[in-house]
Image (cartoon, grey):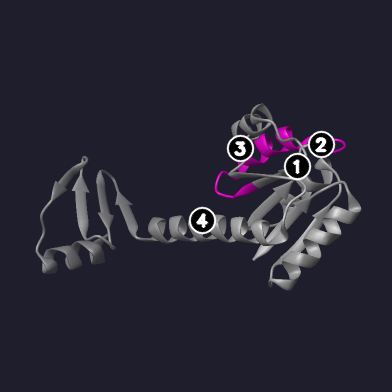
Amino acid sequence: MKILVIEDDLRVAELIQRGLSEQGFSVTLAYDGLSGKKLAFQHPFDLLITDIILPKIDGLALSKQIRDRMPEVPIIMLTALETTDDKVEGFDAGADDYLVKPFEMRELIVRIRVLLKRKSKQSQAAGFLIHYADIEMNLHTKIVKRNQQEINLTPKEFNLLAFLL
């Protein structure tokens, strides 16, 4: 799994990189918002971790821009800003999670795993759906809908329709 860490504090960035690398993650570092934005748009990452207070582009603006172009990529805000208003602003900017510094590496790793598991389940669920015109077929639940109305099919009919779609 590839993770982009956008953190202007070199010591914190390297600590995160070391801790995540030990867990088998591939970590890329960016030390300002502009570099982070360029990397995020040029390379596929499974998850982003960003500070809020960053040079060039702050983490809130960065998260909004990334969320607009890549809505499926999980974003964790990792910052010293700890008020409820700060957290609400972070979530409103597109963060999926918010962790206040100082933090425990174990907690960050667990939060990453939860977000990646959720992303994986969403991707798998999306792979079970087939759409054609006004027909929706869920290969996992074996439910077929046309114009949002469920259609009862025999197993043979279901398999034939799946083949044709």
Mark 4, Cα crowd under 10 Å, few <14 / some 14-19 / many 20+, is: some
**Distance CA(mark 4)–CA(mark 2):** 27 Å
Dot 4 amino acid type: Lys
Towards the viewer: 109 or 41: 109
Q: Is residue 71 magenta?
A: yes
Examine the rendered structure and indicate whether residue 41 appears above or below residue 160: above
| Residue 46 horizontal/vertical position (percent) | 62, 58
| Residue 139 horizontal/vertical position (percent) | 28, 62
Residue at 67% over, 56% down: 108
Dot 3 amino acid type: Gly
Q: Which mark is residue 94?
A: 3
Mark 2, Cα crowd under 10 Å, few <14 / some 14-19 / many 20+, is: some
**Residue labelled with disc 2:** 53
The reply to whether callout 2 and callout 1 are in contact (CB within 8 Å) is: yes
Residue 41 visible to an observer of this rendering: no
User: Disc 2 or 3, which lies upstream in sequence?
Assistant: 2
Dot 1 amino acid type: Thr
**Residue labelled with disc 1:** 79
**Distance CA(mark 2)–CA(mark 3):** 16 Å
Residue at 40% over, 55% down: 126
Towards the viewer: 122 or 97: 97
Dot 2 amino acid type: Ile
Residues in magenta? Answer: 54-75
User: Disc 4 or 1, which lies upstream in sequence?
Assistant: 1
Q: Residue furthest right?
A: 10
